Image (cartoon, rainbow, N blue to C red):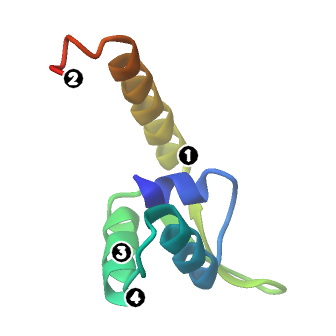
Amino acid sequence: METLAALTAGPRRYSELVHLLTIASGETVHSRSLTDTLRHLQDNGIVEHQVADDDGAVYRLTTEGHELVEVLDDIANWTERHPRTIGL
């Protein structure tokens, strides 16, 4: 979810994602782990890797990725409103 959250504000370079995810988790993000996550998200049409002439390569959410983030946000909001329902 952190990778998706990092991409909600717009396209990010790989190094930006490493930095943001390290800050969010408080732990060093390993390149292999992030690469695998991004590849999986790309394979499922959630993220796209795009090469721009002036900014180099960036990762961005696809339309489906934005829709998924909305659904996940709705689920997170629901769980906050109904903590007893899910046993919290």
Q: CA distance from mark 3 to mark 1?
A: 17 Å
Q: CA distance from mark 4 to mark 3?
A: 12 Å
Q: Nearer the viewer, residue 86 or 49?
A: 86
Front: mark 4 or 3: 4
Q: Is the residue under label 1 in contact with that under label 3 (CB below 8 Å)?
A: no
Q: Would you name the residue on which mark 4 appears?
A: 31
**Which three-letter amino acid code belongs to the residue tagged 1?**
Thr
Q: Is residue 34 above or below residue 2?
A: below
Q: Which mark is residue 39?
A: 3
When asked about the image quadrant of residue 31, the answer is: bottom left
Give the secondary structure at mark 4: helix
Give the secondary structure at mark 3: helix
Q: CA distance from mark 1 to mark 2?
A: 33 Å
Q: Is residue 82 above or below residue 7?
A: above
Q: Would you name the residue on which mark 2 appears?
A: 88
- Left or right of 40 in this view: 34: right
Q: Earlier in the sequence, mark 2 or mark 3?
A: 3
Task: Tell me what residue is drawn at x 48 percent, y 40 percent.
Answer: 69
Q: Earlier in the sequence, mark 3 or mark 1?
A: 3
Give the secondary structure at mark 2: loop
Give the secondary structure at mark 1: helix
Task: Tell me what residue is drawn at x 50 percent, y 33 percent.
Answer: 70
Front: mark 3 or 1: 3
Q: Is residue 1 above or below residue 3?
A: above
**Which three-letter amino acid code belongs to the residue tagged 3?**
Arg
**Which three-letter amino acid code belongs to the residue tagged 4?**
Ser
> In which quadrant is the C terminus drawn?
top left
Q: Is the residue under label 3 in contact with that under label 4 (CB below 8 Å)?
A: no
